[in-house]
Image: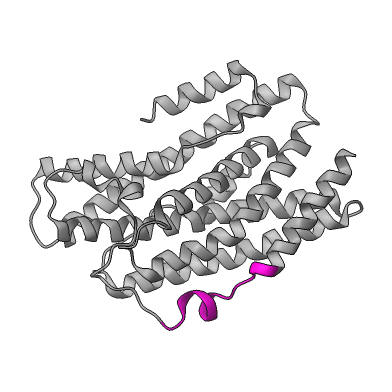
Amino acid sequence: MQQQNQTERYARCIETSKRVRWDIETDVIRDRAFETAQKFLPDGLSLIDGIDGLSETEKRYLSQIQGRTYANVFGLAERFINAKVLEISRDHWLGDQTALEGLIRFSDEELKHQALFRRIDAMAGAVMPDGYTFAADPDAVAGVVLGKSTWAVLALTLDIELFTQAHYRQSIEPDDNLSPLFKDVFLYHWKEESQHAIMDELELRRHDATLSDAERDDAVVEFIELVVALDSILQAQAEADAGYFAETCGRTLDEAQRMCVEAGMLKTYRWQYFGKVLNELITPDQGAQIGAALATLQ
């Protein structure tokens, strides 16, 4: 019965994937360009009001820098997510062909999302000053992530997929003051990520059922190690983005102002990326371990 239910859930994901299928140029970009007079990230994600001393123009510009980084971090994450999805699809090669089709579609869509975010970075670069850098190498990061256990990688992946849904529905969709192009990027991304989150959960639960308590304890430790590694990336990017803002915002920031911007950036990035975990699959002690690790990053 459990296998049948899993197959049915995969079948629904496939049906939805076919229905919402979209093309980068025809459906998302539609011959548009970014406008510097518009915000990219909503205030609910940029936490811009927590950074003191900025004019409205500077706040809008900072939202554009953050929005560019927001897209690039998703592109980075989808590099290792896609590799893991292809790896676990092997478990279904000679078994559930519906699950296999769902995961292959998942992989195909993740490749498209990576292409979309590369396109968005280039389009943002066309209207923003030179000097922006995205510090992390997606292949190097993927190599580190994929060196951890499948449970740890799937738990991180599910967490990313869940906050993707929450960010769009709670902050991006309801904000009428954002760049329409930027909103559409994450509308179409959300349409396919909704199915990915379901498949992530199915695969995590399937894999979790094969683990002993000791193996799950080890996997929780590795999940925490991945969170710490991701935080180091966010720290480096917050520093890079604050430096880029200071050099290109049109005025000279003193050291205190620059540090305030960097601290605000880091707080924002940590808030964006460290959200929910699958508490149902772990013990209270394991949950406390994860909570304690996250608390040190606030």
Q: Is residue 178 above or below residue 212?
A: below
Q: Is residue 22 magenta?
A: yes
Residue furthest to the bottom? 31
Q: Is residue 212 above or below residue 155?
A: above
Near-viewer residue (175 or 123): 175
Q: Main secondary structure of the magenta part?
A: helix
Q: How is the image coloured?
A: one colour
Residue 60 spot, x, y in % from top left: 23, 59
Q: Residue at x 33, y 70 (%)?
A: 125
Whether residue 181 can be seen here: yes
Identify the image quadrant of residue 284.
top right
Whether residue 103 can be seen here: no
Residue 265 spot, x, y in % from top left: 29, 45
Near-viewer residue (147 or 94): 94
Residue 45 spot, x, y in % from top left: 36, 48
In this picture, which residue range is highlighted in magenta? 19-31
Figure quadrant of the C terminus: top left
Identify the image quadrant of residue 18.
bottom right
Horizontal side of 118 relative to 60 (left or right) equals right
**Number of numbered labels in the structure image:** 0
Q: Is residue 251 magenta?
A: no
Horizontal side of 223 relative to 65 (left or right) equals right
Q: Residue at x 60, y 45 (%)?
A: 157
Q: Residue at x 56, y 45 (%)?
A: 162
